[in-house]
Each structure stands twice: as structure tokens, then as C-alpha cells.
Image (tube, coloured by chain):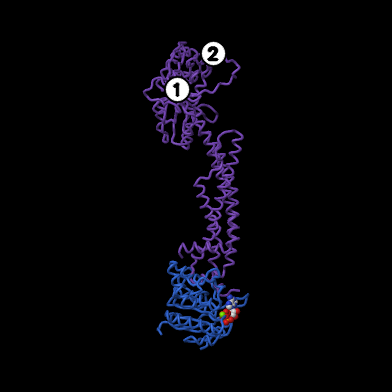
């Protein structure tokens, strides 16, 4: 493990205001994640896992505290430059896949490269290759609604990794899948991350899933307890 | 994001909702078509008016006559502007003037074989004839070497009638002058009879070397000769004038006497008038000026009037027509503008609906690295494409409508006047180009607000969906 963390969370506090009442969701989270690690965040429903992951990935701003990715303070990056930063550092896997329904498997997987400005031929080659690794070589032209949950999540994995970002964030990546498919997807995700030398931060309420990580971080009521 | 990807993506997004896109386009189609057809009517009307004006006389020629400037009370101010060689030089010096010829006019009785007639002869500079837009249908124009040669307007032949034949045919043939072939006059000898003020008579043979074609109707009743020849004939006609001027002397005195109280000033005025009359025997009757184009004609003739000359051109009459046509274009264009404005609102509405439906998609795109510029471009491009498609279809519709209008009006004109039909709706290339650019612009303008809403979508909507 390299001495310098690729992701640091410093005293992260997140409060939501509901009407006149302030709800405190994250109560000072400190966390260091090192390059090449596979980290699981485990906790009960509603404890604030998703909220933390979103803040760590820069999708949401914390009420207080800093997220530092590879030395960059996220709150210092303007919304405009954020897109380029995301393309380089952040891959995101959603629980509900979040594919674009009008695009087929290949188009969905290579969409980040479209925004990167990669020429069509090059990106399609890369997408085909990656989807084949994901076991979808014969489903390239299928629309999401013509595919199973497991197949959709494979496309989503391919999409998160296609730009080779430094950190992959995954929020309950297997939350909607059966146990056998869960096992397949997790193995695929983790092996690809290790192969590419990426870092994975994964959130789950399932201990079996959390065990796939190098390190498990437990969260209760917006605090880390180990 | 690459331009090509942007275009493909926007195009694909549009056709996800075919019916809605087509309906939205329809507004632009109708708006564009109405604007284009309306402008084309304005243009067509102007073109056909200009065409018929041009038949009456050249739009590039200004006829300058002596003139006076008047103050607001209608009293003459300053000296009268005369037609002298200095005037010719002055006119030549005006930028935009391409040719100038001084003009002498004489008229007299004429004999063509057995036929008798009356000629109105205009003496001009033969070298400038071509520049002054004289064109012949038969024969040739004058050259500086010609002596007592003339070029006749196409109607001049109808000035001559055979008295004996008329007496024989009598009223039976009808009184109206018979149309005769202008070419009959070519290479004929016309004998002109002129008289001077002393009562002497002189006959002069004139040889017709060319017949003017029918493009300039204002010249069709006139005969053109070399200014030197005409000057000589004019000098002869003025010969008696000297004695008549001497007679004018005592008459002027009479005026002074009857003027009474204001004797001094009247005396001076009439004295100077007397001097001028002496100088004036060599003054030209008018000066013909050719300008580069219609715009110059209007400008220069206005300028000449300001200088105190009496200037007149066909283009002056055109100006009124142009103003009417311009007003009409503005009104018609305005109606189309309102239609397009409503169409633009339709595009905005469609784009906002589309953003609502695709909020989640926009959020996802942001999470996976789409920039503000990417999102904005996608929606602006979609709006611009709606404009462009509408514009193309609208232009197609305009060509169809224009064709129909022209056919109906041609039918109408032919039945009504029997004249050759001109198109009253004309769509020049610039108008077609303008329509397309404008419809794209409408789309872009209509897409600005929706696009700014799209970039404000938070990436969080991709995650917290309900
Ligand atoms: N936008 C919001 N406004 C107000 N409260 C919110 C908002 N988002 C989350 N919360 C609250 O924050 C708490 C934590 O939510 P979060 O989604 O992080 O939980 P979680 O640990 O991911 O749960 P689960 O395992 O069910 O996904 C919840 O109590 C939720 O009500
Ligand atoms: Mg959650």
C-alpha cells in the first residue's frame, strides 16, 4: 500500500433541512482509502451510506468537511471543471443500473468516451472488447429493456470502467440481483479493478457482499465505528 | 464532445418523439412559409414594376433643365441655373456620372416622299450615344463623322401621313393613325423645313441611319441628330431673334416705367435679365446625364435639384413605388414574424417537456462526465434542428405556394390585359438562404432557456429518483 491515500474524507458532516428541522445524516466521517484498495462500507438501511458515497464521489457537497482525491480538494473544483475531473477520476456504478433506455448496450457502455471526445471507431472497439470481457459479446445491439438485471449491471460496470478512472464508486451494485448473479458481478467487478490497478469503494448492507473487500468499514447513524 | 456525435445524438433524440417533433416543426413550417411567401410577393411586385418602368424609359438617365432655387415662400433665390459648357463640366465631375451630353431641341415640318409630318429633333453628342443607352433595332447609331444624319424613335414613322391618300381614303378608313413599320424609315431622306424669326425659310435634308428599338418609350417619338448639325440649324432659326431683342429693349423700359416706385431695383433686375438673354443664345436646352445605376440616379437627381437645377428621371417615379412596396413587405413580414414567434414558443415548450422527461438521463450523463457545454449543446442542437427541419419544409412549401400564386396571377393578368405575365412572387436564392438561417436562429433562440434549465439539473437526480 502506498503511503499517500488516493481518497481522504475529513470530518464530513451532512445535514438536510426538512422544513424548519435540520436532520443530521453524517456526523463527522474520517476515512483514508489507499491506491489499489477494495473497500466495503457496511451499514443498516438509512445510516447514511449512499449520502457518504455521493459526497465522496463529488455528486453532492458536504455541509462541512473536505474530500480530497489524489490531492485535489473537491470543494475547490468548480462545477464547470468537475466534468473533466469526473471523467479522469470517478467511475460510478448505480444500484438501479441507470442505463439510457434509448441506447443499446454498446452505446451505453461507451457514452463516457463520447463526452471525452474519442473518435467513434476507437471507442466502439474499446467498448466491444470490454463488453466481451463482461460476457456480453453477443448482446451489443440490445436495448436495456431487452436484457436481464445482471446483464444490465454488467453494462453499467463496463460504462464505469471504460475511461479507466482511478476510483470506482459502487452503491449497492448487487442490491437487485440474486445470490448467484451477485457473486458473478462482484467477482467481475473486483477482478477488473485489480487488473486495471484501480481503487474500489463499495457500499452495501449485506455482510456477504462486504466480505469481498480488502477492508470493511462499518457505519452506524452517520458515524464510522471501527 | 465531437460535433458529429453531437449532431447524431441530437437528431436521434428528436425522433424518439416523432409526433411531437413533427407538430413542433409544423409551427416553424407555417411561419417560415408565410414569411418567405410574403417577402417574395414584395420582391416580385417590385421586380415587375421595375420591368414595366424600364419599358417607359431608362432608369439611369437624368434630364437636366435650367432651374431656379426657391425659398420657403416660393420666391426665387439666387441666379438661374443655366445650361452651359461649364454646366456640362460640372455634371461630368459628379461621382457616379458615367456620361453627359448637352442637348439642343428644334422642331419643324418635314417631308418624307409624299408624306408630310412634323419632326421634333434632339441634338446630342454622337460619341456619347451608346453610353446614354441608345439602342437600335435597325441600322446603327450616329458617329461623330456623320453630317445631317439622324436616328429615329420607333414611333416617328407614325408622324407622317400621306395627305392625298388620306383624302382619297377619307373618313372611311377611320381617323386613327395606322401603325406603320418603323423599319420603313431606315435609309430614307427626310426634308426638314425650318423658319427663322425674320421669316426666312430653309430646307435641310436629313438621312435616317438607324431606328431606335422599343426599350425606351419616352424616346420613341423623337429624332436624334448630331449636336453640331442641330446647333447650326438652331443658329439659323435664332437669326431673327437679334432684331426681336432690339425690339425688346423699349419694351423693358416700358416695364420699368409701369413699375413706378421701385424703379431702381426693377431697372437693375430687368437690365441683368437683358444681359442674360444676350448670353443665353448659345445655352443648351437641356443636358442628358447617364449614371452608374438606379440608386445613383436617385441620389444625383436629388442633389441636382438641391443645386437649383430642374432634374427629372424615371427613377424618381420609381421611388414612390418602392416605398409602397417596402411598406407592404414590412407589414406582410410582420404577420409572418408573429407566426414564427408563436412557433418559437412551441419549440421552447417542447424542449422543456423533453427536459422533464429526460431529467434522469441528464443526471446520468453528468455523473459519467458530460460537461455543462455538452448538455447545453445537445439541447441547443435539438432546438436548432427543429428550426432547420421546419425551415426546409417551410421553404419547400413556399416554393409550392409561390408557383401556385404565379400561375393564378398569370391567368388573371392574361385574361385581364393580355400582356405578358410576370411573376408576382419571386424567391431569390438569398431569400431561401435567409429563411434557413433564420429558422435555425429561431430554433436556437427558442432553445436557450430550456438549455439553461438542462445544465442546472443536478447529477443527484440520477441517484435519488423518486
Ligand atoms: N435529500 C434528502 N433530504 C432529506 N433527507 C435525506 C435526503 N437524502 C437522504 N436523506 C436522509 O438521510 C438518511 C440517510 O440516507 P441514505 O440514502 O444515505 O441511507 P442509506 O444508508 O443509503 O440507506 P439504504 O441502505 O436504504 O440505501 C435517511 O434517513 C434519509 O432520510
Ligand atoms: Mg443507499
Residue A143, position in %: x, y? 54, 71
Residue A194 in sight in this render: yes
User: Which residue is identified by label 1?
Assistant: B186
The chain coloured purple is B
Residue B164's disc number: 2
Q: Label 2: how many residues lie within 10 Å, few (<14), some (14-19) or many (20+)?
A: few
Instruction: Judge by depth and name the residue closer to the eye, B362 or A194.
Output: A194
Instruction: Judge by depth and name the residue closer to the eye, B175 or A2.
Output: B175
- The quadrant holding residue B123 is top left
Give the Cα distance between marks 2 and 1: 23 Å
- Residue A200 lies, with reference to residue B191, above or below; the image says below
Determine the secondary structure under disc 1: loop
Q: Which residue appears farthest toward the left when viewing the image?
A: B145
The quarter of the rendering in which ligand 1 is drawn is bottom right
- Residue A87 lies, with reference to residue A193, above or below; the image says above
Determine the secondary structure under disc 2: helix
- Residue B446 lies, with reference to residue A16, above or below; the image says above
Badge 2 and badge 1 in a common chain: yes
Q: Which residue appears farthest toward the right when viewing the image?
A: A19
Q: What chain is tagged by disc 1?
A: B
- Residue B87 lies, with reference to residue B371, above or below; the image says above
Residue B114, position in %: x, y? 49, 14
Q: In this view, does B352 lie to the left or right of B295?
A: right
Quarter of the image where the C terminus of chain B is located: bottom right
Label 2 near ligand 1 (CB < 8 Å): no
Q: What chain is tagged by disc 2?
A: B
Callout 2–callout 1 Cβ contact below 8 Å: no
Q: Colour of chain A?
A: blue
Residue A189, position in %: x, y? 48, 81
Amino acid at each position: 500500500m502506498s503511503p499517500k491515500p488516493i481518497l481522504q474524507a475529513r470530518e464530513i458532516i451532512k445535514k438536510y433541512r426538512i422544513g424548519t428541522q435540520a436532520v443530521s445524516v453524517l456526523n463527522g466521517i474520517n476515512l483514508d482509502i489507499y491506491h489499489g484498495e477494495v473497500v466495503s462500507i457496511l451499514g443498516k438501511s438509512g445510516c447514511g451510506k449512499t449520502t457518504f458515497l455521493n459526497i465522496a464521489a463529488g455528486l453532492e457537497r458536504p455541509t462541512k468537511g473536505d474530500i480530497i482525491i489524489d490531492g485535489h480538494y473537491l470543494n475547490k473544483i468548480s462545477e464547470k471543471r468537475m466534468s473533466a475531473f469526473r471523467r479522469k477520476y470517478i467511475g460510478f456504478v448505480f444500484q438501479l443500473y441507470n442505463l439510457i433506455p434509448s441506447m443499446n448496450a454498446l452505446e451505453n457502455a461507451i457514452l463516457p468516451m463520447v463526452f471525452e471526445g474519442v473518435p467513434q471507431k476507437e471507442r466502439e472497439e474499446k467498448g466491444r472488447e470490454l463488453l466481451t470481457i463482461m460476457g456480453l459479446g453477443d448482446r451489443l445491439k440490445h436495448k436495456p429493456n431487452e436484457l436481464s438485471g445482471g446483464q444490465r449491471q454488467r453494462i453499467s460496470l463496463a460504462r464505469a470502467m471504460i475511461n479507466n478512472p482511478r476510483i470506482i464508486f459502487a452503491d449497492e451494485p448487487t442490491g437487485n440481483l440474486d445470490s448467484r448473479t451477485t457473486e458473478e458481478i462482484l467477482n467481475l467487478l473486483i477482478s477488473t479493478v485489480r487488473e486495471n490497478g484501480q481503487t474500489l469503494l463499495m457500499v452495501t448492507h449485506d455482510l456477504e457482499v462486504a466480505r469481498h473487500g480488502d477492508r470493511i468499514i462499518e457505519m452506524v447513524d452517520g458515524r464510522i465505528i471501527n | 464532445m465531437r460535433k458529429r456525435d453531437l449532431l447524431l445524438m441530437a437528431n436521434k433524440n428528436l425522433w424518439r418523439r416523432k409526433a411531437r417533433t413533427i407538430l413542433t416543426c409544423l409551427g416553424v413550417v407555417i411561419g417560415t412559409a408565410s414569411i418567405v411567401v410574403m417577402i417574395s410577393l414584395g420582391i416580385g411586385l417590385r421586380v415587375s414594376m421595375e420591368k414595366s418602368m424600364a419599358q417607359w424609359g431608362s432608369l439611369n438617365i437624368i434630364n437636366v433643365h435650367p432651374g431656379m432655387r426657391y425659398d420657403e415662400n416660393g420666391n426665387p433665390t439666387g441666379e438661374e441655373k443655366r445650361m452651359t459648357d461649364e454646366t456640362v463640366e460640372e455634371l461630368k465631375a459628379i461621382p457616379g456620372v458615367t456620361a453627359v451630353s448637352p442637348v439642343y431641341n428644334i422642331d419643324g415640318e418635314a417631308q418624307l416622299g409624299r408624306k408630310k409630318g412634323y419632326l421634333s429633333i434632339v441634338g446630342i453628342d454622337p460619341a456619347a450615344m451608346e453610353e446614354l443607352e441608345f439602342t437600335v433595332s435597325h441600322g446603327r447609331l450616329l458617329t461623330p463623322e456623320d453630317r445631317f444624319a439622324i436616328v429615329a424613335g420607333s414611333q416617328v414613322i407614325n408622324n407622317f401621313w400621306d395627305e392625298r391618300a388620306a383624302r382619297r381614303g377619307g373618313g372611311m378608313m377611320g381617323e386613327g393613325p395606322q401603325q406603320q413599320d418603323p423599319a420603313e424609315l431606315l435609309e430614307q431622306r427626310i426634308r426638314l423645313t425650318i423658319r427663322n424669326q425674320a421669316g426666312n425659310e430653309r430646307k435641310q435634308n436629313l438621312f435616317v441611319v438607324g431606328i431606335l428599338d422599343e426599350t425606351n418609350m419616352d424616346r420613341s417619338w423623337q429624332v436624334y441628330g448630331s449636336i453640331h448639325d442641330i446647333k447650326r440649324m438652331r443658329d439659323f432659326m435664332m437669326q431673327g431673334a437679334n432684331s426681336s431683342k432690339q425690339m425688346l429693349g423699349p419694351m423693358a423700359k416700358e416695364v420699368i416705367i409701369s413699375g413706378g416706385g421701385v424703379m431702381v431695383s426693377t431697372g437693375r433686375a430687368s437690365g441683368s435679365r437683358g444681359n442674360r438673354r444676350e448670353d443665353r443664345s448659345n445655352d443648351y436646352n437641356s443636358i442628358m446625364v447617364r449614371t452608374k445605376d438606379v440608386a445613383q440616379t436617385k441620389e444625383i437627381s436629388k442633389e441636382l435639384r438641391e443645386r437649383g437645377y430642374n432634374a427629372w428621371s424615371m427613377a424618381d417615379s420609381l421611388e414612390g413605388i418602392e416605398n409602397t412596396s417596402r411598406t407592404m413587405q414590412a407589414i406582410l413580414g410582420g404577420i409572418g414574424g408573429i407566426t414564427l414567434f408563436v412557433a418559437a414558443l412551441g419549440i421552447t415548450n417542447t424542449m422543456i417537456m423533453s427536459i422533464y422527461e429526460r431529467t434522469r438521463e441528464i443526471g446520468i450523463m453528468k455523473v459519467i462526465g458530460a460537461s455543462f457545454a455538452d448538455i447545453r449543446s445537445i439541447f441547443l442542437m435539438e432546438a436548432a434542428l427543429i428550426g432547420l427541419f421546419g425551415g426546409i419544409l417551410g421553404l419547400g412549401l413556399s416554393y409550392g405556394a409561390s408557383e401556385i400564386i404565379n400561375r393564378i396571377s398569370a391567368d388573371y393578368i392574361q385574361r385581364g390585359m393580355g400582356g405578358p405575365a410576370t411573376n408576382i412572387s419571386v424567391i431569390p436564392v438569398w431569400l431561401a438562404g435567409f429563411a434557413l438561417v433564420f429558422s435555425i436562429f429561431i430554433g436556437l433562440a427558442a432553445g436557450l432557456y430550456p438549455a439553461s434549465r438542462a445544465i442546472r439539473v443536478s447529477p443527484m437526480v440520477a441517484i435519488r429518483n423518486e
